[in-house]
Amino acid sequence: MSRVARAHPLWLAYILHRLSGLLLALFLPFHFLVLSLALHNAARLDAFLTLAEIPVIKLSETALVFLLAVHMFGGLRLMALEWLPWSGAQKTWAASAAAGAVFLSFLFLMRAI
Amino acid sequence: MSHRETITVTVQRGSAATGQHMQEFQVPAYESQTVLDVVSWIQQNTDPTLTYRFACRVGMCGSCAMMVNGVPRWTCRTHVKKVLKDQRIDIAPLRNLPVLKDLAVDMDPFFDKWVAAEGRHHPSIGRDAPIPAINPEAAARQVASAGIECINCSICYAACDTVANDPDYLGPAALQRAWTVYNDAKDADRGAILDAVSGKGGCHSCHSMGSCTAYCPNGLDPLSAIAGLKRATTRRFFGGGA
């Protein structure tokens, strides 16, 4: 009946990893659809790629880079946690994964604009 | 805090069978007061039908755990001052276990899983043999010793979302016990432990959320114990032996 409190760093890292994975999985079919245009309809692909100059699309791409980076770093952290000898600094690793993802997506945004 | 001040305490009453509801109580505030003191005050002064469980009151027996403001805690060693928000506390029975009545839960599923995880001693010698010396500094012994202060309070079990979503999952406490016995030099059947923890609901069901380690009142680390079992079962799968 009562609300359950969960907001500790490793649970947040867990939910961030899950949600980023889910969103990336939802994006994948769209990604493949655009890639297929390169094979079947180059003119449409070029027309579509001009959309990438719109600021809101650039921001969306930045979000995508963040999702990719945070999912990759989070996955590496999990693999290290489960397969390497225990390090004991999991919160630091989780925070580093998020920080690394923010850094990479910010770098992307700076190059894009 | 003077005696005239009161705390508003919301307590979950009833069971799944009879229906559950939240009931509010006004409890006098004291300078030094634990959450268990608050529950006891209600039972002794306002409503003698309030059901809860406790024994030692010093954090050794593991029987008084409850959800306090949505967090599983040992109530006998949780000071009200630490959890009070706007002069209010919300108290509910432990999550992930069937509620018997009010704040008392049925611990059977929790202990059944301890047995299912094979966290029991498998003797390597008879009772008449001399006791072998154990080096407390040995690496495996240090790993085993890290988990032996578990008081079976079920706080990790209540904190775990994997337990909530998978009725077969053995849970952090049972798996940590299995890892402790696995690292005991005196245990003669490590293979049986790996058999018990590598099946459905075993260590590989853990999603490494870390709520067990975050909320363990004794500062134990079931998350790393389960990671150890994952490594041991995988090593055996690839022919590395138990």
Image (spheres, rainbow, N blue to C red):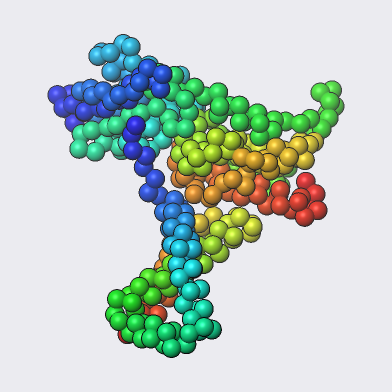
Residue B92, horizontal then vertical, whole percent: 35, 28
A39 and B189: which one is in front?
A: A39
Q: Which of the 4 quarters of the picture holds residue B94?
A: top left
Give the residue displayed 78% in from the left and 46% down from the top: B242
Residue B84, horizontal then vertical, whole percent: 26, 36
Q: Is residue A68 above or below residue B46?
A: below
A42 and A108: which one is in front?
A: A42
B56 and A80: which one is in front?
A: A80
Residue at the left extreme, as displayed = B4
Q: Is residue B215 above or below residue A51?
A: above
Q: Quadrant of the N terminus of chain B?
A: top left
Give the residue displayed 71% in from the left and 52% down from the top: B234
Residue B219, horizontal then vertical, whole percent: 49, 41
Give the residue displayed 49% in from the left and 68% down from the top: A28
Q: Which of the 4 quarters of the picture holds residue A13?
A: bottom left
Residue B222, horizontal then vertical, whole percent: 56, 43
Is A90 placed left or right of B88 in the picture? right
Q: Which of the 4 quarters of the picture holds residue B31?
A: top left
